[in-house]
Amino acid sequence: MAANHKYLCRVDHEEDLQPLEVSETMAYAESCHFTVHNQPDGTVVFQADNGKYVSRVRYGDIDLIEATKDEIDESCKFYFRYL
């Protein structure tokens, strides 16, 4: 839950634009559910409720995180460090 008491979810703006936003007030909404897949290289990838993988996407000089990739590539991989 974010500071505004909302949850991270996939927002369906358009077919090609599926950004992650902190906008949902119900944690059990399907768009707030992500499946975590461990990768052999020690990274993890997240799969959204639409079946697509979460990825960093660059639009000009703006970076977004969206659930739009059909296949896993380097921009879908995230590293975690345990403190």
Image (cartoon, grey):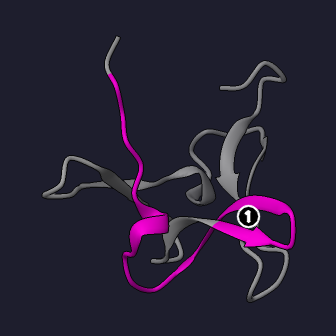
Residue 35 versus residue 18 in the image, above or below: above
> Which segment did they paint magenta?
57-81
Which x, y percent locates residue 29? 62, 52
Label 1 sits on residue: 19
User: In the image as oriented, which residue stretches furthest toward the front?
Assistant: 61
Q: Decide if residue 72 is in sight here.
A: yes
Residue located at (75% from left, 64% from top): 11
Total numbered labels placed on residues in the image:
1
Which x, y percent locates residue 23? 81, 45
* Secondary structure category for the residue under label 1: loop
Instruction: Compare residues 42 and 66 and report the one nearer the observer.
Output: 42
Instruction: Compare residues 4 and 73 and report the one nearer the observer.
Output: 73
Which x, y percent locates residue 16? 74, 87
**Quarter of the image with the C terminus in it:** top left
Residue located at (31% from left, 19% from top): 82
**Quarter of the image with the N terminus in it:** top right
Mark 1, other Cα within 10 Å: few <14 / some 14–19 / many ≥20: many
User: In the image as oriented, which residue stretches furthest toward the top?
Assistant: 83
Residue located at (42% from left, 49% from top): 78
- Amino acid, disc 1: Pro
Image quarter of residue 46: bottom left
Residue located at (73% from left, 69% from top): 58
Which x, y percent locates residue 22? 77, 42
**73 part of magenta stretch:** yes
> In the rendered view, does 59 fall on the left or right side of 71?
right
Q: Decide if residue 47 is in sight here.
A: no
User: In the image as oriented, which residue stretches furthest toward the left?
Assistant: 40
Image quarter of residue 79: top left
> In the rendered view, does 58 fall on the left or right side of 28?
right
**40 part of magenta stretch:** no
